[in-house]
Image: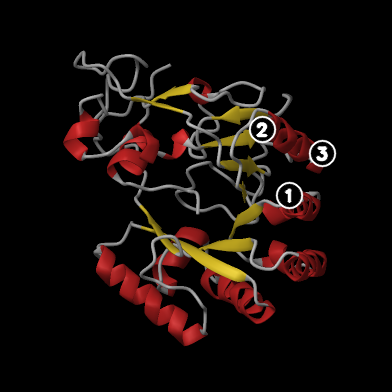
Amino acid sequence: MKDQTDANFGKFADPAVTADGQRRASVALSGLRTLWVNTGTLCNIACAHCYIESSPVNDALVYISAEEVSEAIVDVQARGHPLEEVGFTGGEPFLNPAFPAMVEDTLRRGLKVLILTNAMKPMMRPRCRAALERVQAAYPGRLTMRISIDHHGRGLHDAERGAGAFEETLTGMRWLRDAGIAMAVAGRGFSEEGEAEMRAGYAALFAREGFAIDAQDPAQCVLFPEMDLRAEVPEITTACWGILNKRPADVMCASSRMLVKRKGEAPSYAACTLLPHDPRFDMGSGAPERGQSVALNHPHCAKFCVLGGASCAA
């Protein structure tokens, strides 16, 4: 399967070699520390540039059940993986009716939980707020909510997510603040600002709202590079590790996989949170094995993970 755009025509086709015949870089799973769970691609909004095409009508990834998530955690731990954290993403996780049960079960097992959410109306339903208050009281310090704020200004955020989205997300964050639930933020690098300017803008927003988020900490204020498939991206060869002074172990797929449930199929593992629909990155239905290798043959591998240095994990 070729993932070809005009800018990258002929690239990212062969898992073993690049378009110019060099040995393609790959990453081996050293041990699963973060298990991602996609709760389903349905979302309350449709962002202009959603990498997974979530929307109110896209159920290509259907709702996964609490039982299926529990079974996956048991299987992963039985394989001897050093599992520390389960990250939940979507779509919007709080739309899945079984989501509160997943979170509670995961925390009960002694694992940390990271939830990626837009903090809008689905999270603010009484049942969901009650569940968050309950797990925060029972498992203090083990739950973090990572809120998607594409830009620290209302204009760019609402251009991506729809009019009024910025204020609605802030309303949810104010509730989380008052409930004492730890928050982080995920922003996007689509503005003309440099990183220092972006972090200064987020810092001002957090200060105004009284959010206990350090805008200078890359783990608390994650600024993701843009994933534009129209842009030309270099392929990553084995020689790049030395040139870039990076190690395969630094890349997200060395320590994480994502559990997905495609429509009409049993749950299976995707190599990466960014590529759940690409069959080249389907790693099968069984719990991953140490040493399982992922070829970096997608533009996201290069721009987001290797060159961008980004990771979805905390």
Give the number of the disc on residue 76: 2
Contact between labelled residues 1 and 2, with CB atoms less than 8 Å apart: no
Rendered location of residue 211, percent (x, y)? 52, 79
Q: Residues within 10 Å of mark 1 (few under 14, many from 20)?
A: some
* For the residues bearing labels 1 and 3, Cβ distance under 8 angstroms: no
Residue that mark 1 sits on: 106
Tell me the kind of residue under disc 1: Thr
The kind of secondary structure element at disc 2 is: helix
Residue 212 in view here: yes
**Residue at the spot of label 3:** 67
In the rendered structure, which amino acid carries the disc numbered 2? Val
Q: Nearer the viewer, residue 245 or 64?
A: 245
Query: Which structural element holds mark 1?
Result: helix
Residue at 50 percent across and 54 percent down: it is 314
Where the N terminus falls, by quadrant?
A: top left
SS of the residue under disc 3 = helix
| Vertical arrangement, residue 172 with respect to residue 39, above or below | below
Q: Which residue shows up at 24% across the image and 32% down it?
A: 241
Whether pointer 3 and pointer 2 mark residues with C-beta atoms closer than 8 Å, the reply is no
Amino acid tagged 3? Glu
